[in-house]
Structure formats: C-alpha cells, structure tokens
C-alpha cells in the first residue's frame, strides 16, 4: 500500500488548488482523478468571470492549473478511479481500480456530473445528437440546427458558443426569465441566429439513428409542438459526485452535497471537501479554488499540528 500525507479525490479547480497549497505547505500530496485532470472547467468554451483573465478558454485555464500543480511536486494520477474508502482512524485508506493508498488526510474535490432531463429519448440518443458539453461536441454541429436546454450561465455560454458554428440555435427555458448573468443575456440578444423559447419544456427527444426532432411543451399556453433539429445540448445544472463519501460515513444534505463548515471540514476528523461537491451555495471556479485552498491549509494543520492550529 502506497502512502502519502494528503490525498485529494478529483482534479478539477478545487482539487488542483488544494494540491498546490498542500504541496507548497510541505505535504506529500497525491491527486486521484478518474478522468483527465481539469474537471468541468475544461468543458467551458469561454470564461469571462475568473479574476485576472478578462476572457480565457476553459481548457486553457484548466491546463495552466494542472501544470502549476505538477510544478510544485503534486503527483496526479489520471484515469484512476476511487472505488472504496475507509476513513476511520488516523490512517485513511483509499482503494482505486489500480491499487490502494494510505493518507493522513483526504480532501473530496470530486465535483459534480451533468444533470439529465429524464425524458424519453435522452439516454437512447446520448452521443448521437444528445450532448452535455458544448466545447466537446459543438464542432460536430456546424451549419446544423441545435436546441440548448437550460436557463443559467452554462446554458447561455453554450448557446453563444454553438451559435458560432450552427446555422440555427434555439434556447429552451421552462421559465420566462433566464438566470444567467446580464452580460450573457445581452450577448444572446445580439445573436441573429439565436431564438429563446420561453416557458418551454422538452418532453421527448425523437429520431431514427440520430436526433431528428424534439417534442416541446409550452407551460403557459398548454401548446405542444415538434421541432425539427439535429442536436440537443442539455445544460440544466449538475448533481454532486458524493456517493463514495456518503458510503464511507461523510454527512451529505438532502440533495447529496457534502456538508462542510467554514474550514471545509466534514463530520469526520481529517476529512475535508471543496468545490461543487459541497453544500456551498455558489458553484463557480473562483469559489472552488478558494475552498480548495482553505481545505488544504486546514488539512496541513491537522497533519502537522503547527503551534497556531486549534483543530
């Protein structure tokens, strides 16, 4: 069994920030990531609200974080999935699909996954016209008809990105007002090939081998209609990746988010959480970074017990 002082589960913005501060504090730090390092930050086509970057591609920002993290000595294991945890006692055991590790403290920075609409046809056409990542699949819909579903920043950003590629983009939102930032709403209004479908819900996604149409319901008029299209990008929020934490005894709230205090501590000594997996009300790259930093410094105090640490 390999051992380190601090193990971080997840290599998104929160995990990478925690890694940087953990290593710089002198801790032997390991990050485990079941996919590729970067998290959902890397999925963002463009980011315009991260301090210091007036405008930056999400993949570029994520890569800068990864390079920085490795440069200070953090060991990042990509494509290694955590499958079991034993968080009792002073030595925390983390088992992956490749090996097992022992650590003095663990930070959950496992993020969240894209929420599904839960409508007929969604699962059947996933990867065949249904997508949850604009920057990943947007180029496949050049000069085609696309429907984006959602009303927040992610939906607005995805719509703006897809509008540069597709011939026609419709944004479907179940309410009469978007939750997105005003700057994004104004940008949408200036796009000639974008139409917002207010008070509209997707009831079914149809097609033969690939997406061909969607069944839409106007919840204000009660009208139902079919819309011909080539792709559906679903941007209706995220759900936390907290299943393993919960199974290991970490407390979560009714929505599954890990409950933390202002120091990012969970109910188990030596176990912390940061980023989108926590019950923090704001889900942004900036807040994830701040939480990751706090968690790492608190973990350092727990492990090394410096003179100022009070637990």
Image: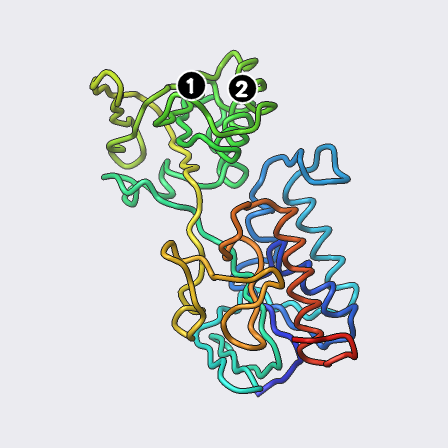
Indicate the secondary structure of the residue bearing disc 1.
Answer: strand
Distance from Cα at disc 2 to Cα at disc 1: 9 Å
Where residue 270 appears, as percent x and y from the top left, is: 58, 76
For mark 2, what is the residue? 188
Q: Is residue 207 visible?
A: no
What is the quadrant of residue 282 in the picture? top right
Where residue 289 appears, as percent x and y from the top left, is: 66, 53
Mark 2 and mark 1 residues within 8 Å of each other at the beta carbon: yes
Return the mark for residue 43. Answer: none
* Residue in the foreground of this view, choosing between 186 and 254: 254
Decide: is 307 above or below 232. Answer: below
Decide: is 269 above or below 34. Answer: below
Quadrant assignment for the N terminus: bottom right
Indicate the secondary structure of the residue bearing disc 2.
Answer: helix
Q: Is residue 129 visible?
A: yes
Is 306 left or right of 218, judged from the image as shown? right
Badge 2: residue crowd in 10 Å (few <14, some 14–19, many ≥20): many
Quadrant assignment for the C terminus: bottom right
Is 217 left or right of 263, judged from the image as shown? left
Where residue 103 appears, as percent x and y from the top left, is: 60, 81
N-term-proximal mark, 2 vs 1:
2
* Residue in the foreground of this view, choosing between 161 and 113: 113
Residue at the spot x=42%, y=32% of the render? 150
For mark 1, what is the residue? 196
What is the quadrant of residue 207 in the picture? top left
* Residue in the foreground of this view, choosing between 4 and 96: 4
Residue at the spot x=63%, y=35% of the render? 46
Badge 1: residue crowd in 10 Å (few <14, some 14–19, many ≥20): many
Where residue 185 appears, as percent x and y from the top left, is: 54, 21
What is the quadrant of residue 57 in the picture? top right
Residue at the spot x=69%, y=76% of the render? 310
């Amino acid at each position: 069994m390999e051992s380190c002082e601090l193990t971080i589960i997840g290599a998104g913005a929160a995990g990478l920030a925690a890694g940087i501060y953990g290593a710089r504090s002198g801790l032997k730090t390991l990050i485990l990531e079941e996919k590729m390092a970067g998290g959902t930050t890397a999925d963002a086509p463009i980011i315009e609200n991260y301090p210091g970057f007036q405008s930056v591609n999400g993949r570029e920002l994520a890569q800068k974080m990864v390079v920085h993290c490795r440069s200070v000595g953090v060991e990042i294991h990509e494509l290694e999935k955590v499958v079991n945890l034993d968080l009792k006692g002073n030595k925390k055991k983390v088992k992956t699909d490749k090996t097992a590790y022992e650590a003095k403290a663990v930070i959950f920075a496992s993020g969240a996954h894209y929420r599904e609409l839960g409508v007929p046809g969604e699962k059947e056409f996933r990867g065949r016209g249904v997508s949850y990542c604009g920057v990943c699949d947007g180029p496949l819909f050049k000069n085609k008809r696309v429907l984006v579903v959602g009303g927040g920043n992610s939906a607005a950003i995805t719509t703006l990105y897809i509008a540069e590629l597709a011939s026609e983009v419709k944004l479907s939102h179940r309410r009469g007002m978007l939750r997105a930032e005003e700057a994004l709403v104004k940008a949408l209004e200036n796009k000639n090939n974008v139409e917002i479908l207010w008070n509209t819900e997707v009831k079914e996604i149809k097609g033969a081998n690939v997406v061909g149409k969607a069944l839409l319901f106007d919840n204000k008029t009660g009208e139902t209609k079919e819309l011909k299209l080539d792709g559906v990008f679903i941007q209706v929020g995220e759900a936390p990746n907290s299943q393993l934490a919960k199974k290991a005894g970490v407390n979560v709230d009714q929505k599954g988010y890990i409950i933390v205090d202002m120091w990012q501590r969970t109910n188990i000594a030596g176990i912390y959480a940061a980023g989108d997996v926590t019950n923090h009300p704001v889900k942004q790259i900036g807040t994830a970074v701040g939480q990751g930093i706090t968690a790492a410094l608190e973990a350092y105090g727990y492990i090394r017990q410096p003179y100022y640490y009070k637990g």
